[in-house]
Amino acid sequence: MEPINAEDFVRYCNTLVGRCMSEETVTDEMLRLAVNSCPSGMVMSDVTRKIVLVNDEIERLFGYRRDELLGASVEKLIPARLQSQHVRHRVDFIVDPEVRRMSAGRDLSGLRKDGTEFPVEVGLTSLGAGKSLLVLYVIVDASERQRTERLKDEFVSTVSHELRTPLTSISGSLGLIIGQAGDELPKSTARLIAIAHKNCLRLVRLINDILDIEKIESGQLVFNLGQVHVGPLVQQAIEAIHGFAEAHGVHVKLDTKSGDGEVSADIDRLTQVITNLLSNAIKFSPPNEEVIVMVEKNDDVVRISVRDHGFGIPVNFRPYIFGKFAQADASDSRQKGGTGLGLSIAKEIVERLGGEVSFADASGGGTIFNVTLPVWDAAAGQNLDLEAPPEAARILLCEDDHDAALAIRKTMRKTGFAVDIVYTARAAIGRADAIDYAAILVDLKLPDGDGISLIVHLRAQTRHHDTPITVISVDPNRGRDDARSSTLNVLGWLSKPVDPERLVQVVKSSIASAPALISKEVV
Amino acid sequence: MTALRVLHVENEPDIRHVVLISLGHPDFINRSCDSGEEALAIAADWLPDIILLDVIMPVMDGKAVLARLRHNNRTACIPVVFLTVCAQRREIELLLSLGAVGVIPKPFDPMTLAGSVRDLAQPRWQLPSQHISITVH
């Protein structure tokens, strides 16, 4: 339908009035026009799910003529495999009507007349109450959005691959000239070759950092958490960066009072954080100065500090220091060879590990960067299931009853699952933020909150937007009746004590039907 | 020590040349080719000690080449190292899970390539860990 401008519309209405239409009829006509002009599909159904209204966009999206839909059940527009789910959402919705997005956190599909399916986003609004309750579905075709997201991922990956190929030839050739013939070259030529080589490597770092940032922002960065001794890790990072420090004439030392501490972290990612802080400190130190590194354990945190003797961070730059491509001085990046992403990446990683990064002026000049991470919690650590085979599908179980949790783990291990256990909602959020779980089991009663709030939090994490979640509870109905539950896409509500076979069956089928898992497997 | 026979499979001639010079040492006997089909034929005939394999190649990619090598009794045990632009952690993990002994991400350091290839060609039981991945920063 052609868009109508306001003046035309008023003129049209006047014409209708001129034809002696009643005011009521004019209002009806205005409404009909508005509904039909809406760029989103609209379907209204009555309490028996019979369609009572559709607009032009619905005809276009689904390929039906209006008369084929009016009076039919809304299920006509939903693929058979999703219909039971739909009935449940709708029942929940009628019990507790409010405007909401039906598709939040799940993949919904529409069924066209020709039998093909397409992804949709659906908003629900209820009109009226009681017997005359009407439900309005506002339906938007989501194929374009999904296609755009896929294209973006493919683009980032392709660009990275395509850039690396010529860079391999360039940096390989330059590296060979420097390594094999560097001494024979005239000084000025050797210097030019070294500049080209250095900048080539910088380009590689830039590609790596951009990929990291992209992964962090899209929630795809995977952490392999385990018990990490910070002392030796820091020592290794210092050794690894020795050549770089030497090239800048800077000495990196471990403080004589430096100790050790254990944290829960991903070794590679934590090394990346320390390396970024060290390389930053080195780059901003005058020659012959020292960078001092220290590891301390205080009560429940392990602190890693990196102190330089540079000129300090300009006051007006401080608020932006963790920003992307942030450089205090426009000429910094060229002089220092950095990517402008190092601190931003470090901060994101540390926060994902449950810690903090901060900085301060060091007494006597220079800057000190501090990373604090929660100490390794032996009780929580034991509950990472490290005995299961690596190919086992990993599941998070949030259950404060230790014995019940161990019993569930025992059963599930036999059928090929690895079960990580957490006792609190807070621990569950932290763990789930770092790991792609194949499925999550939640007890409704937790020491630090209720399970439904926990699921609301989990659904807010991109990583677990679509992860199958099952509730186990003494009183699952209490959770099912919670107003928020219908939007959370909980796939099963099991009563305690849990029948182990039933649980395995529910989890297995939930994983099998989760479309998001397939895409997670694809590299 | 007898020289190590290395087959390098790579469709970019420039990179083949850089690798050839990087491994230009009497310790190595080098052969290279630019496609998966050719690689399978040379591997079955020449039986190299180690194969450096690109992943992204037209017609038959590196993953398919590895699978075909493993299906032929003559070539099933030849250690394969991916030399590839697929350098992200997930990509590396996937390649190792296919049975490669190592993944060397591109761009690689030409001055340390010989040492890495030598290490990766050692019989597995002499290595402390099952897989090696070498990252160049």
Image (tube, coloured by chain):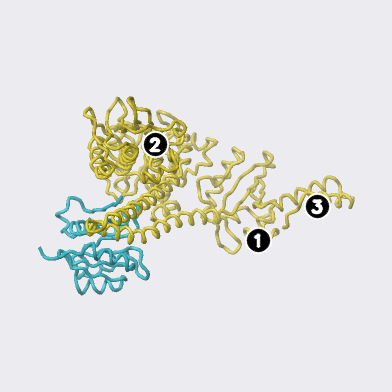
Q: Residue furthest left?
A: B1
Within-10-Å neighbours for mark 1: few <14, some 14–19, many 20+? some
SS at circle 3: helix
Say whether mark 1 and mark 2 are on the same chain: yes
Q: Are marks 1 and 3 in contact (CB under 8 Å)?
A: no
A163 to the left or right of A121: left
**Residue under mark 3: which chain is it in?**
A
Say which residue appears at 72% left-offset and 58% top-offset: A1
User: Which chain is represented by yellow in the image?
Assistant: A
B121 to the left or right of A45: left
Towards the viewer: A176 or A470? A176
**Residue that badge 1 annotates:** A64
Q: Is residue A112 above or below residue A409?
A: below
Q: Amino acid at mark 1?
A: Tyr
Where residue A8 is drawn, which disc sits there?
A: 3
**Residue that badge 2 annotates:** A351
Residue A407 visible here: no
Say which residue appears at 29% left-offset and 36% top-offset: A381
Residue A462 visible here: yes
